[in-house]
Image (cartoon, helix red, strand yellow):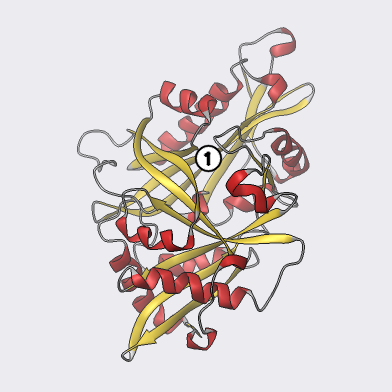
Amino acid sequence: MTELNSPTELPRTGPAAFQVRQATPEDNAALLALDRQCVVAAATPVGFDRSPDFFARSRPYAHWRAYVAEDDTGLIGVGAMALKPVLVGGRSVEAAYFYDLRVAPSSRRLGVAKAVGDAIRAYTHALRPAVAYSLVMEGNVASLTFVQGRGSRPMRLCWLSLIPVEGIAAADPSRLKVLDTSELASALHLARAAHPDHDLFPFPDVSSVQDRFCRLDGSGFEGLYGWEEGGSLAGCFGVWDYSPIMRMRILQARGEWSWAEGRDLHLVFLTPLGFRDTRGLAEVVRLTAARLRRSPAPGVARVLAFTHDQADSAYAELDQFRPIRMGFTLFGLAVGGEGAPSLGSRPVFVDPADL
């Protein structure tokens, strides 16, 4: 994080008075407490545990900033933005991603979210990104209303597809090999081939892949793996156990979620993900399951997590594993002016770091 901004006092009086300032590491404990109060009231109510480090979610990004709102009782709101390189229409540009907006239940409808959002937008404007976007879970009516009321437009419908590891018929793990840095170019080529013409692709070049891996060091990233066919790389995937950053609990574990009753879900994202054809995606699922079963995690449910555009036909290959799908909408905000690249006409690559 860069230097601390001085607090900005908002024009409020009495018990509703609060101020907005840049977050600091000293806010960590208070932010974890605030996060525990904020259940995601989406179509499937979800709770999150981000201990011990609230800011761990932001560290995969090269540049990010968070703002907090506080009154005389403590922290009552938070929001963040990250700046990241992406491909849009085949061009490498800077994108601003807005996330982590939280307001304490007792402080809602007092203008806290607007004030935090204004601080984030003012800072983002100075960075001059080409595009800006946010993600909102299906059924989260309050957030959907808020982002649309501030000028964002719904662009793409997306899925978080979840497959419990214990229910997968595993493949032969001896086919897998660890990929080293000399094979990153081949892996990136496969990832691009698997997601052709996708906007928001977060790896415009090999150096951006290396940067992401470095930033995930110590945050659950277990390495990049692949397999060969005919003497060349046929598929690749990075295994990112997200539990050091965030654990997830389904608060109404009924129906398709009944297996998750009383268990924490440890999401394992596959990123970057590349394959020659859609059959390779199914092979990724089986090979990852085989690898993860060698290191069981008692008391939790490990779940393979795939984030993708609903219009991306390649991910229909996951249907054979009967995934549970949680929907969310990608919203775009016009920030680049006339002639700037735009989102919406092409499928998007949903970066697991954004979840």
Furthest residue in direction bottom, as rendered: 231
Q: Position of residue 11 (x, y in %)?
A: 61, 11
Please identify the residue farthest to the front as the structure is shown: 255
Tell me: residue 176, above or below residue 9. Answer: below
Would you say residue 246 is visible in this rendering? no
Residue 346 can be seen in this image:
yes
User: Which residue is pictured at 24% across the width and 40% down the height?
Assistant: 340
Secondary structure under tag 1 reads strand
Q: Position of residue 211 (x, y in %)?
A: 48, 66
The residue depicted at 54 percent of the width and 57 percent of the height is 60
Q: Is residue 167 above or below residue 124?
A: below
Kindly identify the residue that appears in the image at 54 percent across and 76 percent down: 170
Residue 241 or residue 311, whichever sits in front? 311
- Give the farthest residue toward the top: 14
Q: Amino acid at mark 1?
A: Tyr
Q: 73 left or right of 234?
A: right
Which residue is found at the position 33% from the left and 72% from the top? 190
> Residue 282 falls in which quadrant of the image?
bottom left
Question: Residue 98 appears at what percent x and percent y?
Answer: 48, 39
Q: Nearer the viewer, residue 292 or 260?
A: 260
Q: Which residue is mark 1?
A: 99
Q: Quadrant of residue 344?
A: top left
Picture quadrant of residue 342: top left
